[in-house]
Image (cartoon, grey):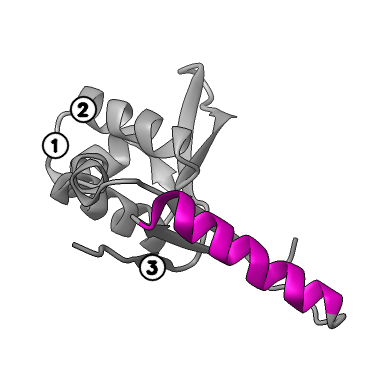
Amino acid sequence: MSKAPKVSVNNTGAKGFFDRARERARKLDRTESLIPEIVIGFEDAADMVRVLSTERVRLLGAARKRPASVSELASTLKRDPRAVSRDVDLLESFGLLHSTYKANPGHGKRRVVQPSASRYKLVANI
């Protein structure tokens, strides 16, 4: 994959899902190409805000600027590494980040965190 897909996070719920599916089906019927994208939908804006807290959005931004280890991210963000690791786990479960383990000579392995996209689009409808 040469280009990371666009990632959208919204709170349109099931209606938004079916609207996007219909639009994509129409494009395929017209033999138009589809742009790769990842859409994460929440039923409620409050749930979206709980998952995408201020600190987690800062974490996404830091990882987007430069893939780094959890300890490097914690240092950059001036946060506890365990809290950053928990946030990475949560954001990874939603597909917003991904991490790999790389050899760290003399110290075992280190977890390198990378963004799932070059850009994130956050939309909340209240």
Q: Is residue 18 left or right of residue 114?
A: right
Q: Is residue 36 in sight in this rendering? A: no
Q: CA distance from mark 3 to mark 2?
A: 24 Å
Report the predominant secondary structure element of the magenta stretch. Answer: helix
Residue drawn at the location 51% of the way across and 41% of the way down:
98
Q: How many marks?
A: 3
> Mark 3 falls on what kind of element?
strand
**What's drawn in magenta, residue-wise?**
12-29
Query: Looking at the picture, which amino acid does disc 2 mark?
Result: Ala
**Within the magenta stretch, is there residue 90?**
no
Residue beneath label 2, please? 83
**What is the crowding at mark 1: few (fewer than 14 residues within 10 Å), some, or many (at least 20)?**
few
| Marks 1, 3: nearer the viewer | 3
Q: Nearer the viewer, residue 41 or 15?
A: 15
Confirm or deny contact between disc 2 and disc 1 (CB under 8 A).
Answer: yes
Q: Nearer the viewer, residue 12 or 59?
A: 12
Query: Looking at the picture, which amino acid does disc 3 mark?
Result: Lys
| Marks 2, 1: nearer the viewer | 2
> Mark 2 falls on what kind of element?
helix
**What is the crowding at mark 3: few (fewer than 14 residues within 10 Å), some, or many (at least 20)?**
few
Q: Nearer the viewer, residue 36 or 78?
A: 36
Residue drawn at the location 47% of the way across and 38% of the way down:
112
Q: Which mark is residue 121?
A: 3
| Marks 3, 2: nearer the viewer | 3
Residue beneath label 1, please? 79
Q: Is residue 13 above or below residue 90?
A: below
**What is the crowding at mark 2: few (fewer than 14 residues within 10 Å), some, or many (at least 20)?**
few
Q: Is residue 117 in sight in this rendering? A: yes
- Quadrant containing the C terminus is bottom left
Nearest to N terminus: mark 3 or mark 2: 2
